[in-house]
Image (cartoon, rainbow, N blue to C red):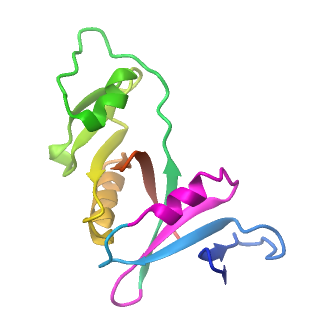
Amino acid sequence: MKANDKGLRLYDRNTSTKNAASAIVYSYNFHYSINFSKVIEDLETNSERRTQIGIVDNEGDVVYYIADLIKWPETRLKDGIINSNNDPKMKELIEKGYQVNSGLKFGTHYRVYNYESEHAPWLIHITEKTHNWLDVARMIRVGHGVNKIIVLAYENYWISLKWTKP
């Protein structure tokens, strides 16, 4: 691991540090308000390396997440299904044919199905800058526990976060 002005450069085991980093890690204190600007900027470069977030607690322990921008492909609703969701933030998904249902039983805003899925692969949480990183960690923990991908609707971006071992 090496640090520079962008963040921590992470090298996978048995990888030379003379090569390009395997991941860039952006580190945040769990009390801080969320700000994905650096993460989004990095993800939009379409680099081959992973973009990770490390959330640090007050004891110095770190939990790591792999971040990705989601581009939703077209799908279609299953026969007989009607979307009754009228949240303007979900308009893109509904127009592309996704089934959007309440995510309350998972502690999030929405669960999302595509045509092929029997169970919702995604949990969507509307995320504002007033949330802190602890809120994000809670969302991901629940999603990981029920084998769902947590997707944060943040400004005009869809950001998936998956827990990973260091």
Q: Quadrant of the C terminus?
A: bottom right
Residue 138 picture location, percent across and down:
27, 64
Q: Is residue 107 left or right of residue 149?
A: left
Q: Is residue 145 above or below residue 5?
A: above
Q: Is residue 4 magenta?
A: no
Task: State the image quarter where residue 76 is shown.
Answer: top left
**Residue at image coords 43%, 20%:** 75
* Viewer-closest of 37 and 112: 37
Magenta stretch, residue numbers: 35-60
**Residue 125 in view here:** yes
**Residue at image coords 35%, 25%:** 98
Residue 92 picture location, percent across and down:
36, 30
**Residue at image coords 84%, 75%:** 18
Q: Is residue 47 left or right of residue 123?
A: right
**Residue at image coords 26%, 30%:** 100
Residue 154 picture location, percent across and down:
36, 51
Q: Is residue 42 above or below residue 88?
A: below
Q: Is residue 73 left or right of residue 136?
A: right
Q: Quadrant of the N terminus?
A: bottom right
**Residue 119 in view here:** no
